[in-house]
Amino acid sequence: MTTPIDTIALFMLGLLGTGHCIGMCGPLVVALPGQTGRWSAHLAYHAGRLITYGVIGASMGAAGGGLIGLASAVGGNPLVWITRGQVGISLLAGLFLLFFGLSRLGFVAEPRWLAVAMPNRMPGWRRLMSRAPALRSNLDLFLMGMFLGGLPCGLSYAAFAKALSGAQMLSGAVTALVFGLGTLPGLLAVGVGAAVFLNRFRQQADILAGLIMIGMAATLIVKALETIV
């Protein structure tokens, strides 16, 4: 389950990822809800995005639980296999978090498919932007938020890796939603034109976000190794 410390760390990961979000999601926020001039449009868009995060997080948690169940069904002592499955998932999630944390600090390069996953390189991006003025209703923006919430992003994928380690649908959904809520203040500020101010501190925020991911990775890996020993 998600502990209070995990909750704080995940929220801070989203909050400190604002600089990254400016480059990744900022253009979407400005082009879609930002054009309406309505706060309700921003809330509708981000509500859709958070629902997608929650669904992905729940799916990752369910996948973790399924892997543990599969391990226990292999045979032998079910408790032993469940423990092994939990250890394996914790190690896997920890390694993902460690990798993304090191990439935030600049020690390793992000995978190419993440580095090039900018909104303007999406298939159909120009067509979407040409229709942006017509997408003014809150329902339109809610649906767009749901659709675009699954864009490849190292920070969100780190949160989803943490959700995997929870091995429960509810825990996974909460994990992803807490991270998503952490991204809200920065993206709402971008929507009202504060991107220049936020981008000024992007390097420092990236370093702190990387350290948080490495800290979560260390916790998962140490707990897994303690179980083995």
Image (cartoon, grey):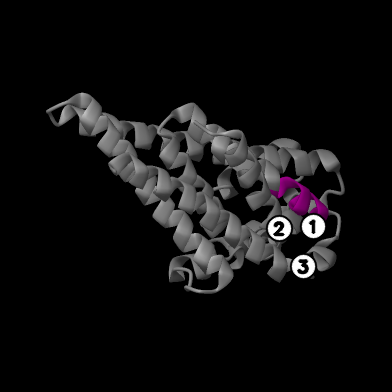
Residue positioned 70% across, 36% down in the render: 139
**Residue, disc 2:** 18
The answer to whether residue 19 is left or right of residue 56 is right
Q: Secondary structure at mark 3?
A: loop
The answer to whether residue 147 is left or right of residue 183 is left
Discs 1/2, front:
2
The answer to whether residue 145 is visible is: no
Q: Secondary structure at mark 2?
A: helix
Residue 168 to residue 146: above or below: above
In this view, the residue in front, 13 or 145, is: 13
Residue positioned 70% across, 63% down in the render: 205
Tell me, for residue 208, which label it has, or none.
Answer: none
Tell me, for residue 190, which label it has, or none.
Answer: 1
The answer to whether residue 95 is visible is: yes
**Residue, disc 3:** 201
Q: Secondary structure at mark 1?
A: helix
Per the model, the C-alpha gap separating discs 1 and 3 is 14 Å
Residue 5 image point, x, y percent = 61, 39
In this view, the residue in front, 52 or 224, is: 224
Residue 9 image point, x, y percent = 62, 46
Discs 3/2, front:
3
Q: Is residue 143 magenta?
A: no
Q: Mark 1 touching mark 2, by CB under 8 A?
A: yes
The answer to whether residue 187 is left or right of residue 102 is right
Residue 183 image point, x, y percent = 69, 49
In this view, the residue in front, 127 or 156, is: 156
Residue positioned 63% across, 57% down in the render: 128
Residue flagged by tag 2: what amino acid is it?
Answer: Thr
**Among numbered discs 1 and 2, the one appearing first in the sequence:** 2
Stretch in magenta: 183-191
